[in-house]
Amino acid sequence: MKHVMPVIEYWRDRIEKHPLHSWLVTPERNVRPEQKLWFALYFTNFIMYFRELNQYHISYGNDRRLDRQREAISAHADEDMTHSRMFMRDLRTLGWNEDLGWRPSELYYWLFLSEVNESLRRRVTQITKLVIEAEHPAVRFAVVEAIEACGNALFRHTDQLAREWTAATGKELIYWGAFHLARETGHAIEDDDEFEEFKKAELTEEQREAARRRAIRIFELIDEQNSDMLRLAQETISQGGFAYRRGIHAAPPKWLPTIPGPEVFDFNFWPDTDAHPSQKEIQDTWRRCREALRNSKLMKFFKADTLKEAKAKVRFAVMYSATDTCGTPTVYKYMLPYPIPVDARERAINRLSRRFGKRADMLFVDWQSLGLDECLDWPISRTLEFIYLDRATDSHRDTRGIITYHIDVTLDPVLRYWTIATLKGLTEAYAKASRHLADWVVKDTGADLPYMTLRLHPDEMKVKLENDPEADDIQFWRLEVSEKTAREGVALVTGIYEQILARLDAMVESWDRNDYPEVFRMLDDVRP
Ligand SMILES: [Fe+2]
Ligand SMILES: [Fe+2]
């Protein structure tokens, strides 16, 4: 580790001098301190996701008891996962709910589909990958140390802004000010002795390289993100606020041209011929799970006695799937593909990834037809809570955590294939059930519900891919795999299936508990 720490220290100095930081603390005429904090709107995905990053990926979860190192890293993650709530409180204290006035669909679009936050989403995915791939505690320590160094540098500078703001308004900011900073020491481990132990750890050459490379990559990603946020915040101030960008980047479509489904799979995708004997067990598991989901008694949620109940349930289902649906493009763009594919198998995964994750924008048409913004009437802090913090949506985050883990923990294309096939196979079973309900609402109200009725984009579905016969010929389920891969494949299919079932269960429970009575409001406002 003594070869890794100097690199971290070099970068710690370098990030300290980032122009974002000096800009934050340099007073400017006509710029109020809280306007400089506007950069946070270009960082919200990371700030709020940080809870999940810590809970599911930095923490070792049940494995934390294996040794003191894992325990120390996990203990730090326990603390850090609580910080998103402080951000929420400051957002309200700063009056951003009222100042922005964004409806839920606008915030969703801004966070998950807008062009302006595209690089942020890519970087959050990359940072998550770097954490998950760093399985060894010493390597993960280096990665987290890099993240913490950047956090500490940022919060020391926002603290100055927070003080100015408190002096002017008499109100306290806990996330941007001293309270949070006291919990951000700039290190991955709080305890001095344990920290020293990490610093003295003996690494193999391979681990040392991994630690060094990953820590540098984290610094580079945050350095780039800081530069983007500086520019974006300056532009926003120059534009006099978010009104202009709201009109472009927080503007979900109200209508889209669509054609009826079903989706055509005229390429090798479904594992519908006999698998190679070495993969037979994965295929059997996949078939069993799909069948079990179809026959699950939970599917009775998608039955209704009255049109009113049908409308409310469709609203509920749209709300409940929004975060996952909006995240799908990011999964297919940045998580599943290989940045530098080295063989036909990896190219084949990249080509599959290009074909999927295309329907997310349609969800916004359903959302608005169903009058969800009006009946929810949530300010942005409430929408953020729903996405990232509500107890009722815990199962969403568990699902994201498990899927992300299965994707990032391996580079094996066969396993990536099974992840895609499982996700597609299970969502198909689920979507078919919810579709009946949506069809009914469309028939009786004339509402436009392209997402829930499984309609397709007219041409986007025909993705223009150049010829690559070698990649296109691959039927992943017919390849020979090692016993270990077969075991991991079974675990992956079962893990994702069980989680999707748990999530469905949580949705039905949440409906029964009446967690969101808002969906019953203004039911006559479902519009064509
Ligand atoms: Fe924090
Ligand atoms: Fe931290």
Image: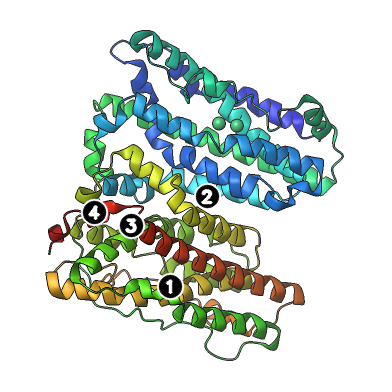
Q: Marks 4 and 3, Cα distance to the nearest angstrom?
A: 8 Å
Residue drawn at point x = 65 percent, y = 59 percent: 409
The image shows residue 177, relative to residue 441, as above or below, that is: above
Mark 2 or mark 3, earlier in chain:
2
Q: Quadrant of residue 43?
A: top left
> Which mark is in front, 2 or 3?
3
Residue 468 picture location, percent across and down? 50, 76
Q: Amino acid at mark 3?
A: Met
Q: Tell me whether the residue at label 4 lies in contact with that at label 3, contact meaning CB atoms closer than 8 angstroms.
A: yes
* Disc 2 target residue: 125
Disc 3 secondary structure class:
helix
Give the amino acid type for the residue marked by disc 4 in the picture. Answer: Leu
The residue labelled by disc 4 is 372
Residue 235 appearing in the image: yes
What SS does tag 1 mark? helix
Q: Which residue is mark 1?
A: 298
Position in image of residue 351 (x %, y %): 48, 70
Q: Earlier in the sequence, mark 3 or mark 1?
A: 1
C-alpha gap between disc 2 and disc 1 = 32 Å
Badge 2 crowding class, 10 Å Cα cut-off, few under 14, some 14 to 19, many 20 or more, is some
Residue type beneath disc 2: Thr
Discs 3/1, front: 1
Asked if the residue under mark 1 is in contact with the one under mark 3, i.e. CB atoms within 8 Å, the reply is no
Q: Which quadrant of the picture is home to ligand 2?
A: top right
- Which residue is more in the foreground, 138 or 366? 366
Q: Are marks 2 and 1 in contact (CB under 8 Å)?
A: no
Residue type highlighted by circle 1 = Leu
Q: Percent from the top left, x then y, of residue 258?
A: 22, 70
Task: Give the SS element for disc 2.
Answer: helix
> Residue 55 at x, y = what percent?
59, 46
